[in-house]
Image (cartoon, rainbow, N blue to C red):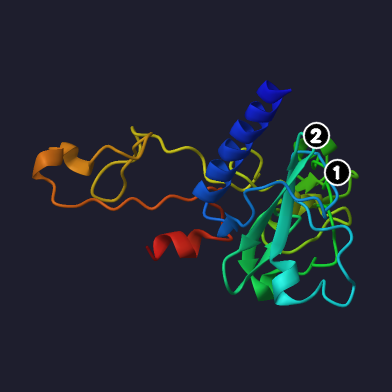
Amino acid sequence: MPRQKQLSRFLLTIVIISYLSFGVHGKLRSKRSLTDVKCLENGRFYRNPDRSEDTMWTTDECAKYYLCLDGDVFEFHCSPGLMFDVNRQLCDMQQNVHNCDLTMETRIPKPLLDMADCANDTHIGCSNGKCIPAEYFCDGSIDCTDASDEGWCDVNYDPNAAAPCDPNMCQLPDCFCSKQGTEIPGKLVPSQTPQMITLTFDGAVNHENWDAYTKH
């Protein structure tokens, strides 16, 4: 049992480090296991299932979220001004969070995409087989009735994501590729480079966010 508890604490530490490294603006509020919040152990963050309906939409209550590991419940809290989006599993601006009434995330099915065999070549399939224009996927607006067009938008699944950078095609001064993001453009010597700033993003680059990327 002690070894299992140690493993649980280790996993919690890994989860916290991984979670905060993606800039979700949350922090561990309670380092000790809570006894007044039920354990919903599925490896995902959730809200207190017994919270009051009168307070669930308040800034403070909607900013709280929990994680249960091996029966131990730990409380987290978003940074000031942010609320927790349980579906996206991150803290965001208040105007972008619309699910304070949900206790656990709604699992969105994976879209069929090209597997739907749509009659129109410019269309791909939702999870339920409905075909919609490919450009509607991951554009910030739900078009599939099952929301599958907006639920799988990371770099591995976004059908409109930019292709991986090809060093043979990407040449200075207009373009530069670095797999690890640590190589300095122009093969400059690190000791002779006063400063290099690297901006990182955890999502896919597509037509929805291209303007934001090109401004930086």
Name the mark on residue 49. none
Up-down relation of residue 131 to residue 179 (above or below): below
Q: Quadrant of residue 101?
A: bottom right
Q: Where residue 172 sits: x, y (%)?
A: 24, 45
At label 2, the amino acid type is Met
* Mark 2 surroundings within 10 Å by alpha-carbon count, few (fewer than 14), some (14 through 19), many (20 or more): few
In this rendering, the answer to whether 76 lies above or below 193 is: below
Foreground tag (1 vs 2) = 1
Residue under the image location 53 percent in, 43 percent down = 17
Residue at 33%, 50% in the rendered image: 198
Give the amino acid at mark 1: Ser
Mark 1 vs mark 2, CA separation in Å: 10 Å
Instruction: Give the SS element for disc 1.
Output: loop
Q: Picture coordinates of residue 214 (x, y %)?
A: 41, 61
Q: Residue at x 56, y 53 (%)?
A: 206
Secondary structure of the residue carrying numbered label 2 = helix
| Rendered-image quadrant of the N terminus | top right
Q: Look at mark 1 in the image and give the residue it sits on.
A: 127
Q: Is residue 111 visible?
A: yes
Residue under label 2:
115
Residue at x-position 29% and y-position 53%: 197
Q: In this view of the protein, can residue 133 be seen by the observer?
A: no
Find residue 35 and report its horizontal and vertical position in percent.
80, 50
Q: Is residue 98 above or below residue 156?
A: below
Image position, residue 87 (x, y; %): 76, 55
Query: Which of these two is toward me, 22 or 198?
Result: 22
Quick check: 46 left or right of 49? left
